[in-house]
Amino acid sequence: FGAYACEYESELMFDWDALAHRFCVAAVPDKCVTQLLVATPVQLMPGDGATADGDNHSRTHNDADSDTSKSSDAEKCFSFSSENNLLSLLDCAAEPRTLWEHDGVSGEFHLSHDKSLCLDYFHDKRAYGVWRCHHIDNERFTPRPEAPAVFCVP
């Protein structure tokens, strides 16, 4: 790879692979560069004390480490157990299964240790789960303008 003036030759054209978050050379599909997703790991908890209201509150991983004034008994965070399953609510502890990263471009929350897995909201079940990212509306979470730490799914 290198940086060259674009002359629109096929070996200089890239195709976007949204599922893998990478660009691949059109003429050589196995030669790719990965999109760098830089995000602060956060823990997610259901909004307003309910599990199915469509709102998520987030807090940064650093907040979770330094916040000793609140009782962990009262705070429950979404916890990943396995792909294609609903999430459970467990005490908020800074461990990989409770850490998520928000992609500001796609609006998706990726499991921090596996970017191919996304937080999904299943409207029919009124519940949250984890599924391989497929980039549709039930994976797109946008912050509320009046409360940027609250994310909503359409």
Image (cartoon, helix red, strand yellow):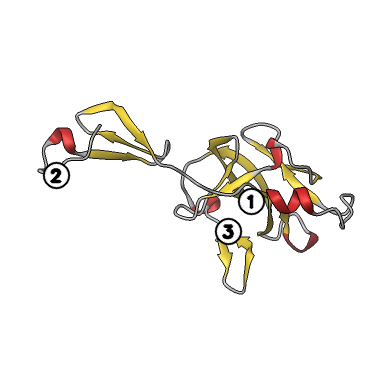
Q: Position of residue 150 (x, y in %)?
A: 65, 63
* Residue position marked by numbered label 3 in the rendering: 153
* Residue 67 occupies quadrant: bottom right
Q: Residue at x 11, y 37 (%)?
A: 9
* Residue 5 occupies quadrant: top left
Q: Position of residue 109 (x, y in %)?
A: 57, 48
Q: Nearer the viewer, residue 51 or 142?
A: 142
Locate the N terminus by quadrant: top left
Q: Amino acid at mark 2?
A: Ala
Q: Nearer the viewer, residue 5 or 75?
A: 5
Q: Amino acid at mark 3?
A: Val
Residue density around tag 3, few if under 14, some if 14–19, many if 20 or more, within 10 Å: some
Q: CA distance from mark 2 to mark 3?
A: 41 Å
* Residue position marked by numbered label 1 in the rendering: 124
Query: Mark 1–mark 2 contact, CB under 8 Å?
Result: no
Locate the C terminus by quadrant: bottom right
Q: Nearer the viewer, mark 3 or mark 1?
A: 3
Query: Mark 3–mark 1 contact, CB under 8 Å?
Result: no
Task: Give whichever of discs 3 and 1 has the lower sequence position.
Answer: 1
* Residue 112 occupies quadrant: top right
Q: Nearer the viewer, mark 1 or mark 2?
A: 2
Q: CA distance from mark 3 to mark 1?
A: 14 Å
* Residue position marked by numbered label 2 in the rendering: 5
Q: Amino acid at mark 1?
A: Asp
